[in-house]
Amino acid sequence: MGLFKDYVSQTRKPEGVLGKMMLNGMNSGHAKMADWGLMHLKRTRPEMIAELGCGGGRNAGALLEKYPSAKVTELDYSELSVETAKEYNKAMIEAGRCTVIQGDVSALTLENNIYDLATAFETIYFWKDLEKCFAQVAGILKEGAVFMIVNESDGTDKTSLKFEKIIEGMKCYTADEIERALKAAGFSSVKTDHHPSKPWLCVLAKK
Ligand SMILES: C[S@@+](CC[C@H](N)C(=O)[O-])C[C@H]1O[C@@H](n2cnc3c(N)ncnc32)[C@H](O)[C@@H]1O
């Protein structure tokens, strides 16, 4: 279990050589699921986007492509994720459309009430005190803005529950648990879509 546990645990806060391998793996491995999530954003025309728990930066890149006039702020508490996301979105950073900062979603230092969209792909499993973190996200969003959560796990699938036992600090949430925490954090409406054949969840919450 040693090396396997060390490797899969890199999903929580990537660091070192294994962390770099994991970030590259997640950039490609999460792409299909992330794009399925992004398809749910039909009516939003965001100008200011916060991509939280950005990992290697691939999903911020997809957001920048989907919304050519938007600016994206990527945030992650792992120094290595920040470095990797900066490499991945180098051209967009130079063009002034992307910023990558190190920070923790449980204590966001981003400006309040300025974002039209916040996204969280495959990351809320690791957010300590979900309700508190969701309240922080609500704080940075404008009234009526959207928070999108995309998870590979619906909190009941066997594979993810196996990883939950191996990776310290990981918690796979059901749609109901996510919805309750969002409402308690002040979001007004919450809609969840479950992939027809996979345990993927896409949750859209409106401030
Ligand atoms: C499983 S990876 C997913 C990365 C990326 N979103 C993706 O889909 O490929 C989880 C990421 O969330 C970050 N993360 C976890 N908890 C965080 C927190 N409290 N604040 C900021 N980032 C966090 C980790 O450092 C890691 O880069």
Image (tube, rainbow, N blue to C red):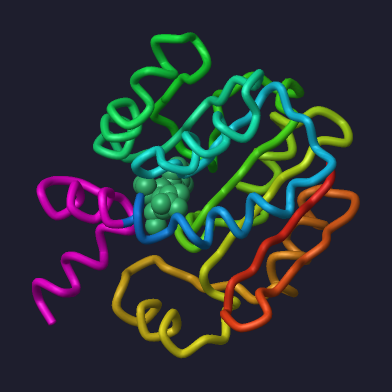
Q: Residue 21: horizontal and vertical position, in percent?
A: 18, 53
Q: Quadrant of residue 179?
A: bottom right
Q: Quadrant of the N terminus?
A: bottom left
Q: Quadrant of the C terminus?
A: top right
Looking at this view, is 63 or 20 the one in front? Answer: 63
Q: Is residue 124 left or right of residue 70?
A: left
Q: Residue 201: horizontal and vertical position, in percent?
A: 64, 68
Q: Residue 33: horizontal and vertical position, in percent?
A: 52, 62
**Looking at the image, how many numbered discs can be counted on the residues?**
0
Q: Residue at x 31, y 71 (%)?
A: 167
Residues drawn in magenta:
1-25
Q: Residue at x 43, y 32 (%)?
A: 103
Looking at this view, is 104 or 174 the one in front? Answer: 174
Q: Is residue 14 above or below residue 143?
A: below
Residue at the farthest bottom position? 158
Q: Is residue 98 above or below residue 9?
A: above
Q: Residue at x 55, y 29 (%)?
A: 64
Q: Is residue 82 left or right of residue 142?
A: left
Q: Is residue 137 left or right of residue 74?
A: right
Instruction: Say if the magenta span includes residue 87.
Output: no
Q: Is residue 110 above or below residue 137?
A: above
Looking at this view, is 125 or 36 the one in front? Answer: 36
Main secondary structure of the magenta stretch: helix
Q: Quadrant of residue 154?
A: bottom right
Q: Residue 143: horizontal and vertical position, in percent?
A: 87, 31
